[in-house]
Amino acid sequence: MNMRKISLLAAMLVMLNTAPSFSQGVDYSDVNIFGAGISLGWYGHGFYGSRSISIPPLSAYYEMGVHEYITAGPFVGFNRWSYRYSNSRYSWTYIHAGLRGSFHYSGILNEMLDGDIDESKLDLYVTLMSGLQLQTYTTNEPFLEGLYDNRVRFFLGPVAGLRYNFSESFGVFAEGGYGSLGALTLGISMKL
């Protein structure tokens, strides 16, 4: 190999090691994330009377890295709404379950806008959730029994989120959009 080829090869190696690229940030292909939260902004059902939350809208997910920018995994959500009017009582119980996939774009945003987001601290992502919602209705009044049927429905929900990591393994997150149980979900997350 002549000296010119060796110099060109050395220059290319130096450029590859110093050139900015998307892969210099956090690589999600080997990351496992567990998150649990409480949802806000979901009103449920009701005819009349005072509404109370028997069990607040709770959700949890586990995502595994499948690509440099993508994580995916199962989620589950649960809540129960109760109503009372005089001696009448009725309630709805919801169970959501399905799969979610998240695209983490902090590194790409840094590269495109020449930004300096600390990807180890701030994770910006968009998520698509898909699954089934099981709704059950109960009442103690015979005249209210036939008003709602128990049902199962399919749903598809886009979500935008951000996660702030206090340490390498612990953080908090906020997600907005048509997610598992509400317009806004706040919670904690752990990288496993």
Image: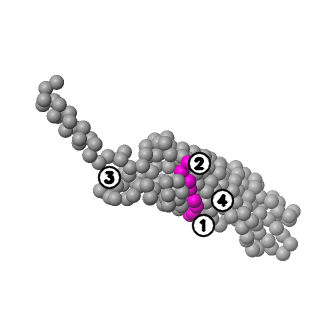
Labels 4, 2: front one: 2
Residue named by callout 4:
58
Part of the protein shown in magenta: 182-192
Q: In which quarter of the image is the N terminus?
A: top left
The first of marks 2 and 3 along the sequence is 2
Q: Distance between the residues labelled 1 and 3?
A: 34 Å
Q: What element carries label 4?
A: strand
Residue named by callout 3: 111
Going by the numbered disc 3, the residue's amino acid type is Glu
Mark 3 near mark 4, Cβ–Cβ under 8 Å?
Answer: no
| Disc 4 residue crowd, few under 14, some 14–19, many 20+, Cα 10 Å | many
Return the residue nearer the eye: 24 or 73. Answer: 24
* 7 vs 26: above or below: above
> Is 87 or 64 nearer to us in this picture?
64
Q: Which of 113 and 15 is in front in this view?
A: 15
- Whether residue 88 sits left or right of residue 67 in the image: it is right
* Residue position marked by numbered label 1 in the rendering: 41
Q: Where is residue 110 in the image (x, y as percent from the top left)?
A: 34, 55
Neighbours of disc 2 within 10 Å: few (<14), some (14-19), many (20+): many
Q: Which residue is depicted at the point 50% across and 61% down?
A: 166
Separation of residues labelled 3 and 4 (CA atoms)? 36 Å
Quadrant of the rendered image containing residue 148? bottom right
Front disc: 1 or 3: 3
Marks 4 and 2, Cα distance to the nearest angstrom?
14 Å
